[in-house]
């Protein structure tokens, strides 16, 4: 019964997110994952193209990259990016030169998730999720009750 209540609450919160929700930085500019207790970090190899975003023990202050609304950047030059512009489940989040392209646009709809903003019509919302096997960050269908997708 508790699971059913939590699921219905999570689904209600999920349904209440407006399609045009704007990106806003998490409190303090860092994002801590509920499943791991670790923070969203720049990458496994900061400052290099195609380095995987990961979670780690040290907080990173995220901000929009210059002239690129909706992006998440730790250093202004590189932004978090859905690899190859894909929206498929399992797509790795990487560090890539900040350009403000569709695959670098993120939203914080207020339910604890970080969502890729640019989706095609009818596509299921996709959220940043921690892959527990290797602590990389990837896209998965949004499930606001899943601690791997909860950021605070």
Image (cartoon, rainbow, N blue to C red):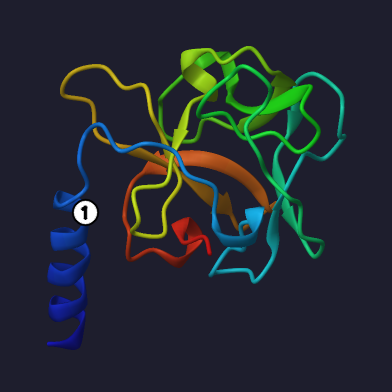
Residue at x 62%, y 35% (from the top left corner): 72
Report the residue at 76% width, 38% height from top: 74
| 104 relative to 57, above or below | above
Rendering quarter of residue 111: bottom left
- The residue under the point 65% across, 71% down is 37
Give the percent coordinates (x, y) of residue 85.
Answer: 50, 15
For label 1, the SS is: helix
Left or right of 77 on screen, residue 107:
left
Q: Nearer the viewer, residue 115 or 92?
A: 115
**Residue 113 rendering spot, x and y as whole percentages:** 41, 53
How far across and how far down the image is residue 102, in percent? Answer: 46, 16
How busy is the neighbourhood of tag 1: few (under 14 within 10 Å), some, or many (20 plus)? some
Identify residue for label 1: 14
- Closer to the camera, 132 or 71? 71
**Nearest to the observer: residue 64 or residue 117:** 64
Spot occupied by residue 66 in the image (x, y as percentages of width and height): 68, 21
Horizontal side of residue 58 vs 32, given as left or right? right
Q: Is residue 21 left or right of residue 78?
A: left
């Amino acid at each position: 019964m508790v699971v059913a209540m939590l699921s219905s609450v999570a689904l209600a919160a999920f349904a209440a997110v407006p399609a045009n929700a704007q990106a806003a930085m998490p409190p303090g500019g860092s994002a801590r994952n509920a499943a791991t207790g670790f923070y969203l970090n720049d990458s496994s190899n900061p400052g290099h193209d195609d380095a995987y975003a990961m979670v780690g023990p040290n907080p990173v202050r995220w901000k929009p990259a210059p002239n690129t609304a909706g992006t998440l950047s730790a250093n202004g030059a590189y932004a978090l990016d859905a690899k190859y512009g894909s929206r498929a489940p399992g797509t790795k989040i990487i560090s890539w030169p900040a350009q403000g392209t569709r695959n670098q646009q993120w939203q914080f709809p207020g339910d604890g998730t970080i969502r890729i903003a640019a989706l095609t019509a009818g596509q299921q919302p996709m959220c940043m999720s921690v892959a527990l096997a290797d602590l990389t960050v990837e896209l998965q269908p949004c499930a606001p009750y899943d601690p791997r997708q909860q950021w605070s």
